Amino acid sequence: MSFTTKWRIALANVVLLFVAACASMNINLPPVTDAPTGERLPGKIIWRDLLTNDPAASQRFYGELFGWEFESVGTASNLKSNSSYTLIRHNGKLIGGMIDTLALNNRDDISQWVVLMSVEDIDASVDAVTASGGKIMTPPTDLQSRGRIAVISDVEGALLGLLETRDGDPRDSEPEVDGFLWDELWTSNVESADAFYNKVAGLTKDTVDIDGRQDTAPTYSLLKAGDTPRAGIMPNPLEGLDPVWVSYIRVESPAAITSRVAELGGRVIVEAGPRPVGGEVAFVAGPSGAGIALQTWPLEDNN
């Protein structure tokens, strides 16, 4: 068994343990928004969870860099910690969560941001996953106030969650500085990923030429729900990296952020610089190794 396969299995097992623990111990995770809308927005990334073996270091890292706030979800359970799950807020608004992998008795050295995509009917979406070549890591599971969740890997092996919210998804709004901006799938086969997410979430593709050259085929896909862009898909830009969903944080200056990453226990994977499609971008990892991208917005032409 290769290292890549072992890492994928370990990552999936952590998520499976967490979902199973919440279900079996009747842990009521809160909704993904403080303001229930009663409306679902299929294909939208509505939540992001950080898997980390060092929540304290991760909280310091993201708190210092972006001003995020953290709120433990107490659990009367047999987990090693009563704060195995932490809510993340930005300017008081819920934006994500943090899972303590050690509290799940997990010894594997894995850390990653995992995105949750909204679906209208999770049972139908799960059927579409298997029919389209993906895998079900955890079957649809009731998380009470949050809704019903299934963890899957797509046709190329990228891990994500599908969530049918109970009370509705967060409304679309202008991304705030130091909040989440965008999500991309970095994959080995853009065309197969396009087809997969069309079947699973009803998203349609719109191709964009990100290198600005007229003699090359488009290399970037926008996944849209109607006319609304929901995510991007691009060929994996980093050698040796498995297919993965990558979240972007909106920042005013990627270089200013990357200058502080090392002192807070993280590392810079890709230094700040212009992006062909416009604006500036950087890619960093937090103290436990989970990668996340930084991007200016709105985009400005680099030419």
Image (cartoon, grey):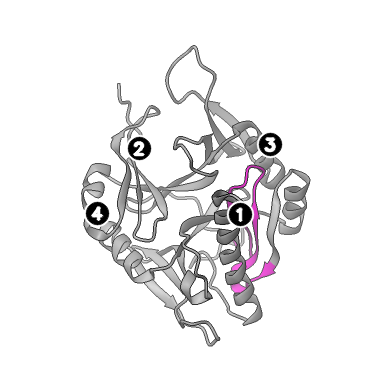
Q: Residue at x 62, y 52 (%)?
A: 1
Q: Residue at x 45, y 26 (%)?
A: 210
User: Which label lies toward us, 3 or 2?
Assistant: 3
Which element carries disc 3, helix, strand or loop? Answer: helix
**Disc ID at residue 298:** 2
**Going by the picture, which residue comes out furthest to the front?**
1
Q: Which residue is mark 4?
A: 262
In magenta, the rendered stretch is 141-168
User: Which label lies toward us, 4 or 2?
Assistant: 4
Residue 166 shows in this picture = no
Which percent across, then down, holds residue 218?
53, 23
Give the crowd class for mark 3: few <14, some 14-19, many >=20 residues within 10 Å.
Answer: some
Give the Cα separation between the discs numbered 4 and 1: 34 Å
Give the Cα separation between the discs numbered 4 and 2: 27 Å
Which percent across, then down, holds residue 261?
26, 53
Q: Earlier in the sequence, mark 4 or mark 1?
A: 1
Q: Residue at x 30, y 51 (%)?
A: 267
Give the Cα separation between the discs numbered 3 and 1: 17 Å
Amino acid type for the residue under numbered disc 1? Ser
User: Which label lies toward us, 4 or 1?
Assistant: 4
Q: Earlier in the sequence, mark 4 or mark 2?
A: 4
**Disc ID at residue 195:** 3
